[in-house]
Image (tube, grey):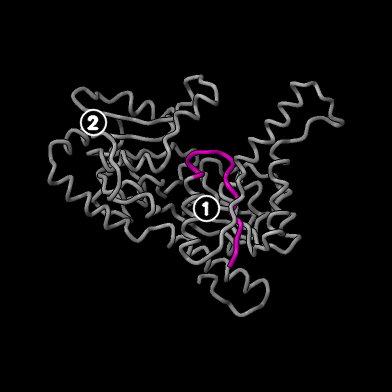
Amino acid sequence: MKVMVVEPGHGFSTLDVHHGLCAGLRANGVTVIEYPLMRTLESMELIVGGAEILGIDVPGGYPDVYQMASMGIPGQAMAKQVEAVIFVHGLNVPLSIPVTLQRGGYTTAIVCTETPYQILHEQSFASLYDLVFTNDRAGVPMFTGNRPDTVHYLPHAYNPAVHTIEGDKAAPCDVFFVGTRFPERAKLLDNVDWSGINYLERTLDYGNGLPTAALLEQITPNNVTATYYRAAKISICHHRADPTGLAESLNPRCYEVPACGGFLISDPRAELFDLFGDCVPTYTDSASLETVVRYFLTHDEERDTLARRQRAAVEPHTWAERARDMLATLARHRSATTMEEPTSWVH
């Protein structure tokens, strides 16, 4: 099988999902053509920006850079003779693109990485795709514009090529946190008394007024993040505030930290207890976070025992397994729409 996977259009967070999914598909014998949406967007922005600086008059106004950057997707799908086109994130792709692909006979799928945080945006275009994969299990019934059989839960996972115990380690620290400094996270972390604790964070802070270029320099690549997970005694996962109050599922850190041999603590999520049982200590506010941190910094043996249990819990949850589930769903969809006998797309 040959598929095209379209990048999210930016260079952090969801791009890691893209890389993980591509690696997982290839591990299942799939030929993967990656569409570099981020670089294409950057090129189109330079072209339009340069025309504006030069004062070039464009009849009808300057074109939409997102439309320009995405126009090559159908042509690339045709040139490479793919069977399906998978969009990761998809919020940066004009609605005309999946419609055009469907008219050309291509199976289209979207991996919604922002459920439930941007559910209204995701709902607005999900019905234009043949299949929808959402990162939160509570989000499946939210896609009311789709037939129930076309919406599926695709949990996050870890990439064994990146998230492994073996590998480089950053300088040792007691506590590590990586992620975007959303207001709720900033409030939580800033109200902890870190005195006497070697606390390190690698965060992206939109609230500090920095220009985009400076913000991008704050991004820590996923393979570098893994070196911190291996080196820290404790790694924190704190999920984003959920506007719907319905979120149940885990973000990537919950899989990646234990896969690297790190010790994970987290705020509560329903799926956290389903996956890990009682081996991930939880907190609810700054005070309880500090209590948990200080306790486990002085209980090395208990911390190490729980870290081993955490790693055992996530071990099966690789991107190869997620891709296998996706391919089975694609095969069932193809069978239902073509009336052919179901055949495996895994080789």
Q: Position of residue 14 (x, y in %)?
A: 50, 44
Nearest to the observer: residue 324 or residue 171: 171
The furthest residue to the top: 209
Q: Which of marks 2 and 1 precedes in the sequence?
A: 1
Q: Is residue 227 above or below residue 306?
A: above
Q: Residue 122 vs residue 320: left or right?
A: right
Q: Is residue 64 above or below residue 190?
A: below
Q: Residue 222 vs residue 35: left or right?
A: left
SS assignment at label 1:
strand
User: Is residue 5 inside the magenta stretch?
Assistant: yes
Residue receiving disc 1: 134
Name which residue lies at 33% across and 34% down: 177
Q: Quadrant of the N terminus?
A: bottom right
Q: Position of residue 343 (x, y in %)?
A: 56, 76
Badge 2 amino acid: Glu
Q: Which residues are magenta?
A: 1-15
Q: Position of residue 185 (x, y in %)?
A: 39, 31
Quarter of the image for residue 220 reads: top left
- Badge 1: few (under 14), some or many (20 or more) residues near its Cα, within 10 Å? many
Residue 48: which numbered mark, if any?
Answer: none
Nearest to the observer: residue 10 or residue 167: 167
- Mark 1–mark 2 Cα distance, whole angstroms, equals 33 Å
Residue 290: which numbered mark, if any?
Answer: 2
SS assignment at label 2:
helix
Q: Position of residue 121 (x, y in %)?
A: 61, 42
Quarter of the image for residue 234 reads: top left
